[in-house]
Amino acid sequence: MSLKRIVAASTTAVIVTAAAFCSSAAAEPETINVWIGTGRSEFSKGIYHCLLNKKTGILTQPTLAAETDGPGFLAMHPDSNRLYAVCTVDKKPSVAAWSIEQENGRAVLKFLNAVEVGDGGATHLSIDRTGKTIVTAQYGGGSTAVFSLNSDGSLKERTQLIEHTNPSKAVPGRQDDSHAHWAGFSPDQRFVFVPDLGLDKVVIYAFDAEKSKLSAHGFATLPPGSGPRHMKFHPSGKFAFVLNEIAVTVTVFRYDASEGRMTEIETIPTVPEDQKIKEQAISTSEIRVHPNGQFVYAANRGHDTISAFRFDEQTGKLSLIEREHIRGATPRNFNVDPSGHWLLAAGQDSHTLASFAINQSNGELTYNRSNVVAPTPICVLFQHE
């Protein structure tokens, strides 16, 4: 081949490659959908929606996406086109389903159906990765419920309602009864975990995916008076982090996936005692693990901060990085975007949603000066692409 043909061929290859790259870059969306569950108040009317700019961390002003009563916690179907909430429908505490559709270039919710929860209504829900089963935790009733889904993502039926028993009573008035607070699946989907604030235990169930049914498997026990609220698994699947609402602590567990067993490594405070006593009321609310597994974040209500920790996989222990104020009041919930670059903190009592940049090397948070009005936000959910 002549030099001219080689140059021409090379130039063509470069142009084709560049075109492909530009096409791929153009296809990459600049924003990600953020769905906001809200508590009952004179300001909130249902589920709200906004956009997060993935490059700048800037938020758009949230707008009402679906009018419904008290859609506290949300969950996303694995295919990202169905959204679920614990809420009240026709005056009945329920789990409800919506389809996520596009209308005039924006995401909108269209109601599918709802199934009654019973037992006082749910405070949290999760969906399995096949999109066939939802589990809920009932704080008031102290129970776990299970729901099966239809192939179109709508709710089929409640298949189980399991009552929790034997509260610890370590803290009178808070632990006189069981209070299931969170329900979620193990990384391999073989087990379901339910931290119960009243029991000082994480209740562990074996999960039958075909029947959408649970069976008793065991417990992980927390120090007396802990009040376990929420938990998350490490990306490796070898560790679990339980956030304790009453004690304002985090307990790290080593997780044996083959046995579905949790073994405590350590329990550490999210806020030191000398700062706790300065608050009229203080409690933890949410815990998240960074996608890279190196950082763990916990929210402190009353103190109105996010505690950032570095996690050492060799020792299984946490070390404090910093405590960052949320630029709002009462961080009932927060979330880390799928890329791990942004943290959004919801101020329940300040009606705000604030954006923070996450330093990828040391886990520190930097306020992004993007703080929008969000009525009574108590759940922040990203829509995976």
Image (cartoon, helix red, strand yellow):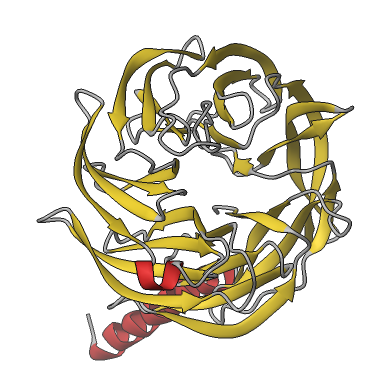
Expressed as whole percent of the image width and height from the top left, the position of residue 364 reads 37, 78
Name the residue rendered at 47%, 49% in the picture: 245
Q: Is residue 188 above or below residue 298?
A: above
Name the residue rendered at 64%, 30% in the picture: 140
Name the residue rendered at 78%, 62% in the picture: 375
Return the residue nearer the eye: 178 or 46.
178
Expressed as whole percent of the image width and height from the top left, the position of residue 104 reads 86, 60
In this view, which residue lies farthest toward the left?
A: 314
Residue 235 in view: no
Q: Quadrant of residue 48?
A: bottom right
Name the residue rendered at 34%, 53% in the picture: 250
Quarter of the C terminus within the rendering? bottom right
Return the residue nearer the eye: 150 or 287.
287
Q: Is residue 172 above or below residue 58?
A: above
Expressed as whole percent of the image width and height from the top left, the position of residue 41 reads 83, 53
Q: Is residue 376 above or below residue 124?
A: below
Q: Is residue 346 above or below residue 251?
A: below
Return the residue nearer the eye: 148 or 32.
148
Residue 344 in view: yes
Expressed as whole percent of the image width and height from the top left, the position of residue 124 reads 59, 37
Using residue 89 as the reference point, say whether residue 297 is left or right of it. Answer: left
Using residue 201 as the reference point, say whether residue 68 is left or right of it. Answer: right
Report how many numbered discs are placed on residues in the image.
Answer: 0
Using residue 304 as the reference point, say whether residue 225 is left or right of it. Answer: left
Q: Quadrant of residue 328?
A: bottom right
Quarter of the N terminus within the rendering? bottom left
